[in-house]
Image: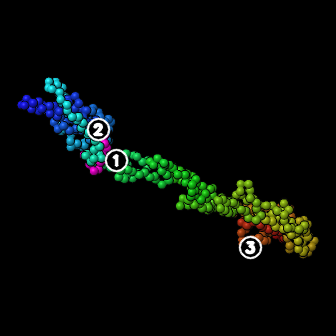
Amino acid sequence: MPGLKRILTVTILALCLPSPGNAQQQCTNGFDLDRSSGQCLDIDECRTIPEACRGDMMCVNQNGGYLCIPRTNPVYRGPYSNPYSNPYSGPYPAAAPPLSAPNYPTISRPLICRFGYQMDESNQCVDVDECATDSHQCNPTQICINTEGGYTCSCTDGYWLLEGQCLDIDECRYGYCQQLCANVPGSYSCTCNPGFTLNEDGRSCQDVNECATENPCVQTCVNTYGSFICRCDPGYELEDDGVHCSDMDECSFSEFLCQHECVNQPGTYFCSCPPGYILLDDNRSCQDINECEHGNHTCNLQQTCYNLQGGFKCIDPIRCEEPYLRISDNRCMCPAENPGCRDQPFTILYRDMDVVSGRSVPADIFQMQATTRYPGAYYIFQIKSGNEGREFYMRHEHKFSSVSYAALSQALRVQEQTGCGLRP
């Protein structure tokens, strides 16, 4: 009896010891069996895997795996600490060499499922759903994901798993939106600046052609990237609101646009001339119409048509008063044999002329000079009409026995009288 008891004790110890060859198979990927406690502990891949994360990414260990995140992540506070991980940071000890099978009598023993599995009614090892049975160790902010022989704790989209907590990811810091970004818990929202519309991808923006949709301009609309510009037709200028156009008064810019008068019109202007003038081909200069040459005057056959600047004048025939006799169209003579002519000028000469405006003053208009045709004769020069405003004056030149007339008005009638006297 004592010998049998010893055999049973040894058999029970053999059943409780894990098989050295199958110790690693009792834990899922990312976990390792702790021989002292018999539990599956998380493997720190950030320590065991060389260069687990490359570039600017840093490795953060997780329960059953690891995560690569940017080093500039502002919410990172340190690597994830598994409360069940082995504090030993050195290399894991090599598996113990297999023990030789003891030379004991073989007895039947019950089937044992590995860690994370349990026996069902048909004596088969099936996976234990720790998430469904609430036998997991995930925090309330995490979600449990069942795996073969175990489980893993993770976070929903838009969250980081850091130090056992799920923290919101600020997607706006990583340029997820082309223009405007608004971060929300677990997600983000993209919007566009005025003048743009959000594309179907929810991230990029497309320029809006305001000219093709609403055309806010009164005259001409030019689309630009993100906006538009209003332009006006020639002769108009853009108002301060940048949309409406107002007529441009070209006549107010300069007084030299037209020779006579500038007339403003919506979007343009034109030059006009006074009556008796026509507009030249340059559309700004005026030229006098010679009514006497074109025949569009009202003078009768006895009158003489005299062209003036901007009009004409009908001059009546010269009428010689007694005792003068008309000897030509513009000359009257007093016969010497007539006693009434003794104290009168011998001849009277009538001349009509126009004076072109715009001449510099004072200036000589014409000159009359005495001759020695009649010995002992003397000459009298005087302005008979047209000098009511005293615009004309006579300048005597004794050297040539002549007189010059300077004027500012347009018409002048000069009377030259030649007579005989006692004085030389």
**In this picture, residue 69 sits left or right of residue 4:** right
Q: How crowded is mark 1: few (under 14 residues within 10 Å), some or many (20 or more)?
A: few
Residue 70 or residue 161, whichever sits in front: 161
Q: How crowded is mark 3: few (under 14 residues within 10 Å), some or many (20 or more)?
A: few
Residue 246 sits above or below residue 209 on the image: below
| Residue name at image x 61 percent, y 57 percent | 219
Res 43 seen here: no
| Residue name at image x 25 percent, y 42 percent | 79
Residue 307 or residue 226, whichever sits in front: 226
Amino acid type at image mark 2: Ser
| Residue name at image x 73 percent, y 62 percent | 273
Residue 122, numbered label: 2
> Disc 2 or 1, which lies upstream in sequence?
2
- Which portion, as a residue range, is magenta? 137-148
Whether residue 144 is in magenta: the answer is yes
Residue 229 sits above or below residue 421 on the image: above
Task: Find numbered disc 1 in the image and state the secondary structure of the residue it sits on.
Answer: loop
Q: In which quarter of the image is the N terminus?
A: top left
Residue on which the image places disc 3: 388
| Residue name at image x 41 percent, y 52 percent | 189
Picture quarter containing residue 78?
A: top left
Residue on which the image places disc 1: 156
Amino acid type at image mark 3: Glu
Q: In which quarter of the image is the C terminus?
A: bottom right
Looking at the picture, how far across and down is residue 412, in whole percent? 77, 67
Q: How far apart are marks 3 and 2 (CA)?
A: 145 Å
**In this picture, residue 326 sits left or right of residue 233:** right
Looking at the picture, how far across and down is residue 57, in whole percent? 31, 39
Q: How crowded is mark 2: few (under 14 residues within 10 Å), some or many (20 or more)?
A: few
Q: Distance between the residues labelled 1 and 3?
A: 110 Å
Callouts 1 and 3 close, C-beta under 8 Å: no
